[in-house]
Image (cartoon, grey):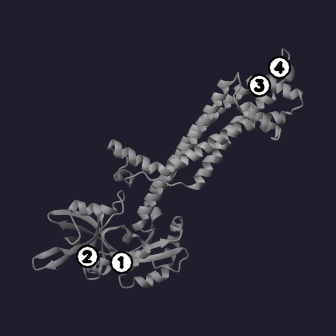
Amino acid sequence: MYLPWSLYIALRYTRAKRRNHFISFVSFASMLGIALGVAVLITVLSVMNGFDYEIHHRFFSVAPQVTLITQDDISESWKNVAQQVEQIPGVKNDSPYINGKGMLSYDGRVAGVSVMGIDPLEENKTSQLSQKMLLGDLDSLKAGGFNMLVGDQLASDLSLNVGDQVVLLTPQASRTPLGIMPRYKRFTISGIFRIGNGFGFDNGLAYINLNDAHRLFAGGQIVSGLHITVDNLYQASNISRAIESTLPPQFILTNWMEEYGAFFSTLAMEKTMMFFILMLIIAVAAFNLVASLVMIVNDKQSEIAILRTMGASKKQILSVFIIQGGLVGIFGSLIGLVTGIILALNATAVVDFIQTVFHVQFISSSVYYVDYLPSRIEWHDLALVLATSIGLSLIATLYPAFKATRTQPAEVLRYE
């Protein structure tokens, strides 16, 4: 016998004999239950990781991490402000902007938009807008060209295409011989972008050149400032306070955590709650493991008594059943781990196949922010699920193992 004594006995008890096929079946069912729970948990966590990653990636591709706001016009002096901001530890890049409201009109159709004046060269430092272009490019926003970029949803609503000319009306007013008239300007659509539905970028945002925005909104209540990226997203609040303390009081700092933090906190809470809810599947399988081990202990009473009379200690008897239950938990967890990884890697393809075959749409971008099922495996999730599953399996062995140590050889062997 080359194996350790406890492991050798545990392996023999795990294999079915003439009288205990049902007990072995219960053990096998417990193993499958653990494997199923682990596989489902890994798949669901991977899908939630995929949604979280896609939402973060799409949102922060254009949304600023930290925003510096002022009612003053800094279209000419923003570089001086940027130099002060860049001295703050944790600040990565910054770019100027001018923000205003307006209404687009084209061929009898109108739509309200938020107009963002940007410098194309500087904007590449803080956003991925240039990578989100479907038609045209970011460099088309030349100063004085009065070109405009719009989202694909807005372009669809107004039936716009590259080269079309739209009229942008602003809340600012101009005095004319006919009286006070709203200020307006004709722009040429030079590009169409797609960020993703859900946050209103594709149907309510238009980009123009910074200098064009300065001329368009001049004389009115202007909102300008800097869009700032940071090294650590989750330090945005601390960095905002550090920047605010170094600048004059007319500058106001806000960040994504203040505006959208509750939404992303909800996503994190959903993932945590889903982990604990699906862990109940593994817990149920662990209870089945308790039942199977108790039946094994009752079935092996005489053999346990004989082992005790041959000199086996309570510690050795205890280790036999802990190892036996642990083997079921470990093999079940490993099977579930492999199955879960395979499902997670192919979740997108499987759902796409089902949607194509049955002509249904499970995922709508208007509800889930993406129009497909994303999946992203995080290795720390795999380690957590595997450790928790094996841990629950080992805990489940404690009661049957201690029950086995309380076997009294004299009582059991009295009638043998």
Cα gap from disc 1 to disc 2, whole angstroms: 12 Å
Secondary structure beneath dot 1 equals: helix
- The quadrant of the rendering that contains the C terminus is top right
Residue at the extreme front of the image, as rendered = 1
Q: Which residue is mark 2?
A: 147
Residue at the extreme top of the image, as rendered = 415
- The answer to whether 339 is drawn above or below residue 121 in the figure is above
- The answer to whether 29 is drawn above or below residue 250 in the figure is above
- Residue at horizontal 72 percent and vertical 27 percent from the top: 296
- Image location (x, y in percent) of residue 16: 69, 28
Looking at the rendered structure, the kind of residue marked 1 is Pro
Residue 128: which numbered mark, if any?
none
Q: In screen coordinates, is 115 left or right of 379?
A: left
Looking at the rendered structure, the kind of residue marked 2 is Asn
Residue 120: which numbered mark, if any?
1
Residue at the extreme left of the image, as rendered = 178
Looking at the rendered structure, the kind of residue marked 4 is Val
| Foreground pick, 218 / 394 | 394
Q: Is residue 280 visible?
A: no
Q: Quadrant of residue 1?
A: top right
Indicate which label's residue lies in the foreground, 1 or 3. Answer: 3
| Foreground pick, 132 / 182 | 132
Q: CB of mark 4 within 8 Å of CB of mark 1? A: no
Indicate which label's residue lies in the foreground, 2 or 4. Answer: 4
Q: Which residue is mark 3?
A: 300
Q: Which residue is mark 4?
A: 412
Q: Earlier in the sequence, mark 1 or mark 2?
A: 1
Q: In screen coordinates, is 35 left or right of 114?
A: right
Q: CB of mark 2 within 8 Å of CB of mark 4? A: no
Cα gap from disc 4 to disc 1, whole angstroms: 86 Å
